[in-house]
Image (cartoon, coloured by chain):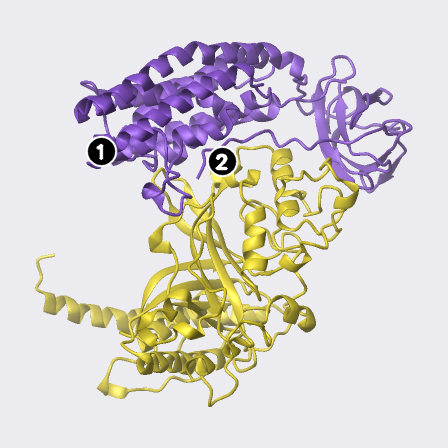
Chain colours: A purple, B yellow
Amino acid sequence: MRRARRTAVIAATALLALAGCTGHDGGEVALTVSRSGCATEWHDPHGGEQTFRVHNVGINTTEVELVDPANGAVYAELENLGPGATRPMQVTLGRGRYAFRCLPEDTDAVTGPTVTVTDGPKRGAPAIVPVDEQVLRGPVDTYRSSVQHAFPTLRRDVRRLAAAVRSGDRAAARRAWLPAHLDYERLGAAYGTFGDLADAIDRLPAGLPKGVHDPGFTGFHRIEYGLWHGESLPALRKPADALSADVAKLVTQFRTERVDPNDLPLRAHEILEMTLQFELTGEADQGSGTTLATARANVDGTVAVLDALRPVLRSRFRGLSAADAALHKLRTLLDAQYRHGTWTPVDDLSAPQRRAIDGAAGEALERLAPIAALAQVRRAQ
Amino acid sequence: MSESRWPRRQLLTGAIGVGAGAVAGVGATLGSQRYAHADEPAQPDHVEFHGAHQAGIVDAAPARSTFVSFDVLAADRAQLTELLTTITRRARFLTAGGTPPNPGITAPPDDSGILGPQVPADRLTVTVGVGASLFDHRYGLGDRRPTHLRPMRTFPNDDLDPAWCHGDLSVQFCAPNPDTVIHALRDVTRATRGAMQIRWKLDGFVPPPRPSGTPRNLMGFKDGTANPDAADAHRMDQVVWLGREAGEPAWTRGGSYQVVRLIRMRLEFWDRISTAEQELLFGRRRDNGAPLDGTHEHDAPQYAKDPVGSAIPLTSHIRRANPRTAKTASSILLRRPYNYDRGVDAVGDLDMGQLFVCYQRDLAAQFEAVQTRLIDEPLVDYITPFGGGYFFALPGVRDDHDHYGSALLA
């Protein structure tokens, strides 16, 4: 099994433009879009709950957005409306000005005429000023440099681990394993960017036909398994050296690798999704009993992503301070399990302690999840 | 708890007597309520047990099921034959319904009583399959193994728990009501005690259409829209049933390869991603099941017009599973999935997902070809196959004188 490396599932999006004609159909507004314009025939607008049946009569896949013409903020959207397809767009309209915007694949956006709603509720659905690649450039740079800043420590600690394994001193090797592993786990956000190397470095035995004894089982957890299951240290030299080499490769590769801007908003909750699934369950544990330490490192990784995104989120995400507070709560609960230089193995937690940590992780996840949706890259032009 | 064991047992006996009466009363009430629904389509009260093929494969899945994998304890071939004969006899009775014999004061009752004194057929089906391990040295069946029958492979996105994999025999019970399923399971395991032992078991349920069309899975998506038409006998001969197959032992005729995969869904995670992302992962709309380039559930995706995946991403589940090309037409299989609920996991998240069952003539060319195309599909972050197995669903029991596996053991 691999760790999630959710890449933004964005369809490739096709060509040309759209136009419109409208008609009422039992409280629904039927719009057609084609190459001659974008919903140009939305007459007689009304406030309140509305359903637009948008029919793409053109030959190209398009996105259709309902926007505030003053600032481009998006009230509702239909992604990837294929040629010939009809899909409903549901939205609550408050009083104000609206326009449809069509973003056909590979060509410029077309904005339909502005209409004004004068009846119905004062405020309708909230709108988000769209996030495009330009807006995310700053956060991506911040994030990249935080990763690069952390690389020298990771390389050093992985080398120390390999040296300790070579020395034949099991206690020293066990002591060296955790700092190196945590260095890596703090980078959490980078799973997607690290590609196949992420598997080589930090995979779990799941999905391998021979499990922990499979030759494909490599990286930190392979070494952990050996160190805590009485394998001879000479037998672990090869995996330890391979880990050093893979980390070195990663550092080199990262310099030239492009970070998909969509990754950052996704990782805001995804790092902790994996923490809940693999660390807080104890599933990732290969003997060291340090999954709570990993969880703590993953909180740091999440905070790094959130901090990078903060300039983008401040004006768009009302839940930001609640998300910060939830992360703080989780961090405090985890820190309480680090005593006298050791971490409590997750199975040694009392049931109330365990529920408190799992509950805090779940709450943090719920609070972070909207970021992926609202900061998803949307086309500007 | 200071009483000696004897008084407690006497007490229990009395209490059970009262309880049984109460349960029967509730059952009667439910039964009359059920028949009060005049708008329910009239269905025959039983599914025919005898035939060239087993029931529970191409017939529409009723609301409830349990899928049970057994290890066979029979000492030799004669005892294995006896086991399969016993299962046949019990399945024949249970699927027809009737009055269980009364042993009087000589023994505990023959029947669990949970369906009342007369056992209704309640459209029960019992479907029996054999696993690769049945063809090992124990019963001298090595040369009769269906050609493709092997232990289930580990696919790269699997996280298989050996306690939830494989088995010598599979028995699937399906019925519209959960008590019918439990009754049948208790009956069959009791009649075969000592000859086979449960290895793993998972209960399934299928929801009604919401609001119409194909039932939804626990991710909220209609699941099974593109299944071949199970009412089309000719199509089922092409897709599901073994005929006179080259390279297959003759006894397999009328049977089908059965694949079961126990697939955990990460529902909390899933609920935290946007509808748009969910739809791109599947390739269908969540509201009505239409392909993303279409309008209605049964619109066929037009992949030829969407070569780069503008509307339906190339990595989406439906496009990987069934690319609808001439080359991949031979990999179409018949799915008969159920949802499952296994409680909660170690962190308090719901342990729910899909009890995936499918049938085909050729394991490699159908299930394994599809599953290979699905390796590393983006949906894998939200699902974890943790168990299952490959089985061969036996040919049907022809008549009152026949039994499961008669051709295999002849």
Give the amino acid type for the residue marked by disc 2 in the picture. Phe
Q: Give how far across and how far down residue B151 sits, in percent.
A: 42, 59
Q: Give how far across and how far down residue B211 sits, in percent.
A: 65, 52
Please tell me in which quadrant of the rendered image residue B346 appears: top left
Q: Position of B176 compared to B7: left or right?
A: right
Q: Height in image: A348 above or below A318?
A: below
Residue A157 seen by the camera: yes
Give the amino acid type for the residue marked by disc 1 in the picture. Trp
Residue A10 circle label: none
Q: Give how far across and how far down residue B388 sits, in percent.
A: 43, 56
Say which of B359 and B349 sits in front. B359
Q: Position of A95 compared to B58: left or right?
A: right
* SS at badge 1: helix
Q: Which residue is drawn at 56% across and 16% down?
A: A256
Q: Which chain carries label 1?
A: A
Q: Which residue is under mark 1? A: A228
Q: Which residue is drawn at 32% across and 17% down?
A: A159
Residue A291 seen by the camera: no
Q: Give how far across and how far down residue B120 sits, in percent.
A: 47, 78
Say which of B75 and B212 sits in front. B75
Say which of A212 and B96 sits in front. A212
Q: Height in image: A143 above or below B103?
A: above
Q: Report crowding for label 1: few under 14, some 14 to 19, many 20 or more residues within 10 A (C-alpha).
A: some
Q: Disc 2, disc 1: CB below 8 Å?
A: no
The C terminus of chain A: image quadrant: top right
Picture mark count: 2
The N terminus of chain A: image quadrant: top left
Q: Which residue is under mark 2? A: B269
Q: Position of B75 compared to B225: left or right?
A: left
Q: Report crowding for label 2: few under 14, some 14 to 19, many 20 or more residues within 10 A (C-alpha).
A: many
Label 2 to label 1: alpha-carbon separation: 32 Å
